[in-house]
Image (cartoon, rainbow, N blue to C red):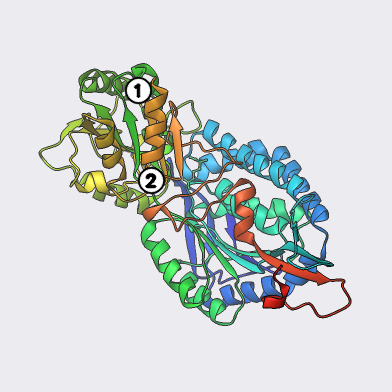
Amino acid sequence: MTSILSVVAGQRIGDPARTVPSSNPANTADLLGTIGLASPDDFVRAARAAKAAQANWAALPAPQRGQVIANVGRLMTANKDRLAALVTREIGKPLAEALGEVQEIIDTCDFFIGEGRRLYGQTVPSEMPDKQLFTFRRPVGAVAVISAGNFPVAVPSWYIVPALLCGNTVVWKPAEYSAVCSDAFYEIFAHAGVPAGVLNVVYADGPDTFAGLEQSLAEGLIDKVGFTGSSEVGVQIGELCGRHLQTPCLELGGKNPMVVTEDADLDLAVEGALFSGFGTAGQRCTSLGTIIVHESVHDEFVRRFSAAVASAAMGDPTQDVLFGPLLDEKFAAGFEKSLGWIATHHQVIGATGRVSADNPRPGFVGSPEAGLFYHPVIVDGVRADDELFLSETFGPIVGITTYQTLTEAIALGNEPGYGLSSSIYTTDPNKAFRFAQGISAGMVSVNNSTSGAEAHLPFGGNGKSGNGSRQSGIWVLDQFTRWQSMNWDYSGKLQKAQMDTQTV
Ligand code: UN1
């Protein structure tokens, strides 16, 4: 069993006496490690270390920072199996998905290695003769990254890799329940040549993180905050940053709709709904919330979907299963609350609740008594005012409702007020484009899952899903750099801008 402490300027710190455990959600008796918690002061120390290290790191030419990122990518490739196995053991993600998660880090590194040789600015003509204008991207400074544990290594890399490439330093606060994965991830960055102080890791609980962040912002030690997590916490982070005139990068929850039109390939739609809704046990911000199916194909769709869900394998995540356990006890408790929303007027298809000897599931692989396993739930007939229709559940539950016109389907998709991902299954391209135009979502899939965004496209949401920020690809550069303009006058005299004499 590992004992994990925070890392500030390359030194391990924290209170080894104040610990939280991290255990395997597929077998809660399997303890992976204990995490010594950091205090608000430790967070501030980490911010100070990041701030102190930033100028030297930024002075390294961007192509050389890109070479460090290349080393990270190579080490991630060499450690792919080991890291994926750890992800499966610590958060219960099926191994195939865990391998895909590590691959997402490698893809992110691949993309940003090249950006080290670009980080383009512009040359811009001046209004005046013998004068030239330029723009440069400058690093923002020290970045605080607060990430969730459902993607314990891929999502942090979306922040950390481009932030470092752009010449920033980082204070990373991972989720405690995925700390063993975070520690392995950190060690790879350190071995790849990321200098001490450039990447710091702080395992503080929620209130202590807020206290430490507030103090760091007040002292001018943190210049940008990146947060992936719930919309509720996102609002608090947004308020805190706003008081210091900062705009955080917020990637929050989702209630992602999937529209199935009357002309859709129903088998394809069933396959997409199965993975979007129940893959990762529904614990992605991009997981499917509600299927909005045309009334003429509703019965047939529900018949095929229910059969597919009933025969899907779930259980031991080291095996070939659709989904494993929930992330940890806190998430299991949250999901129990969502199960409570299933009012009597709903038609619930299949059993609900924890999988156990009293509540078994055919086809289950593994040991239900030992883990946080839940039945997949389909709720037919959800209404637009149901809590289940409006709120994120973060678990294996999918609602179904019907529509008559595409306009109505789009309005239903927009109703919950999130806006992260969305999907339409149709064979009619006109419907696909009309849907994309009408749905307020950062991401639209046509004949594909709501989840599974690729690492080089803009990722982010509207409404309650974020504040309009986008991660990944070139778009994230705007989060981690600020534009600086330069005007260079080589006329040898003072040329005054905004003077009438200058106009032709
Ligand atoms: C998340 O759940 O926070 O698009 C991110 C997807 C993944 C990322 C999910 N690539 O489903």
Query: How many residues crowd mark 1 within 10 Å: few (<14), some (14–19), many (20+)?
Result: few
**Cβ of disc 2 within 8 Å of ligand 1?**
no
Q: Quadrant of residue 277?
A: top left
For residue 363, which numbered disc appears in the image?
A: 1
In the rendering, at what x and y percent does residue 202 appear? 58, 66
In the rendering, at what x and y percent does residue 238 appear? 44, 67
Q: Is residue 35 above or below residue 394?
A: below
Seen at 74% across and 44% down, the residue is 75
Name the amino acid, label 1: Gly
Left or right, residue 104 beside residue 368: right
Seen at 65% across and 67% down, the residue is 140
The kind of secondary structure element at disc 1 is loop
In the rendering, at what x and y percent does residue 200 appear? 65, 65
Q: Quadrant of residue 46?
A: bottom right
Left or right, residue 362 beside residue 7: left
Q: How many marks?
A: 2
Query: How many residues crowd mark 2 within 10 Å: few (<14), some (14–19), many (20+)?
Result: many
